[in-house]
Amino acid sequence: MRRHRVLRGPSAAVLGVIALLLTACSGAAPDDSRGGGAVTPPPAGAGFDYQLGGPYAPPDGVEVVVRDHTASPARGLYSVCYVNAFQAQPGAEREWDTDLLLREDGEDGEDGEVVMDEDWGEALLDIGTAQKRERIAARVYGWIDDCATKGFDAVEPDNYDSYTRAPEGLLSAGDAEEFLTLLAAHAHDRGLAIGQKNTADLAPDREKVGLDFAVAEECGRYRECGAYTDAFGDHVLVIEYDERGLERACAGWGDDISVVRRDLDVRPAGRPGYLRETCDDL
């Protein structure tokens, strides 16, 4: 399976400062009461912005915003909370128990090297057994709880496709689905919808896993948007990073689902290199 681009924002410390400033400006108040009951996916076909590189005032017409879990939600808009659930952030592998990091098969009974996502310098988490999935999930639950407390409406767990970057036999699609099923149940308990990030091959299993919508990077470029709409209907958020991808996504699905083009680093508005386009700009 091809790997799509998976984007990273600035450090948690930087985003924490930004979050405090944004909270003061937005008036967003923490909400400790959320939990249980039906959840609501993002509105279909709504104006959409992807702000992982840092939060900023959403452009006119935007109804759905994705931000990192260290940031605050966008006031008055449907807000999706990003968490890196299947891999450790760069340098953060030291914060995990060593046995929860996926390792290559070693020699003479010794542990092998930690398996890394070389594109992003991230250690893969070992979701290969039920016990380890539960231990890893316990930490991710804390991030999901923070999302709910801050007032986000949904959560986007990234790197669902980490099993495709593991050496053969170490992780499987079934392991990924079992782990995401745990996260989905917890998100729903906290009143949050949960999205599938990329991984088109597993979209047909969305109901079994308990997923409410999809976040698809470059499905126009790689002609995969139909795989997501077949599974999730119009509840699909698409991010493209080049003009051709935007054109394809808009031509095929722009009247029904949310589509935006962002710069590769998803920079905040006002920063050099910032780019945001929609189907209306074509």
Image (spheres, helix red, strand yellow):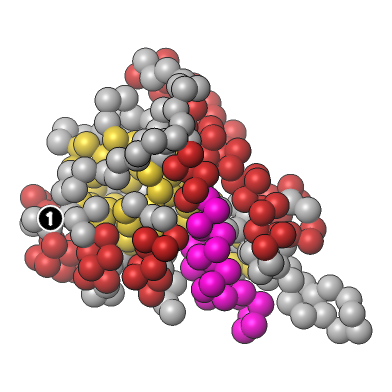
Percent x, y of residue 168: 62, 84
Asked whether 172 falls inside the magenta stretch, the response is yes
Q: Is residue 138 left or right of residue 279?
A: right
Residue segment shown in magenta: 160-183
Relative depth, front residue between 96 and 130: 130
Quick check: 145 above or below 43?
A: above
Q: Which residue is mark 1?
A: 256
Where is residue 5, by image quadrant? Answer: bottom left
Relative depth, front residue between 196 and 259: 196
Relative depth, front residue between 151 and 91: 151
Magenta stretch, overall SS: helix
Q: Is residue 215 left or right of residue 261?
A: right
- Residue for point 29% across, 45% down: 41
Question: Dot 1 surroundings within 10 Å: few (below 14), some, or many (20 or more)?
Answer: some
Of all residues, the one furthest to the front in this rendering is 37
Which quadrant is the C terminus positioned in? bottom left
Percent x, y of residue 146: 53, 32
Answer whether residue 239 is visible to the viewer in this image.
Answer: no
Q: Is residue 276 left or right of residue 81?
A: left
Where is residue 238, by image quadrant? Answer: bottom left
- Residue for point 61% across, 74% down: 171
Where is residue 34, by image quadrant? Answer: top left
Q: Is residue 177 left or right of residue 105?
A: left
- Residue for point 72% across, 59% down: 131
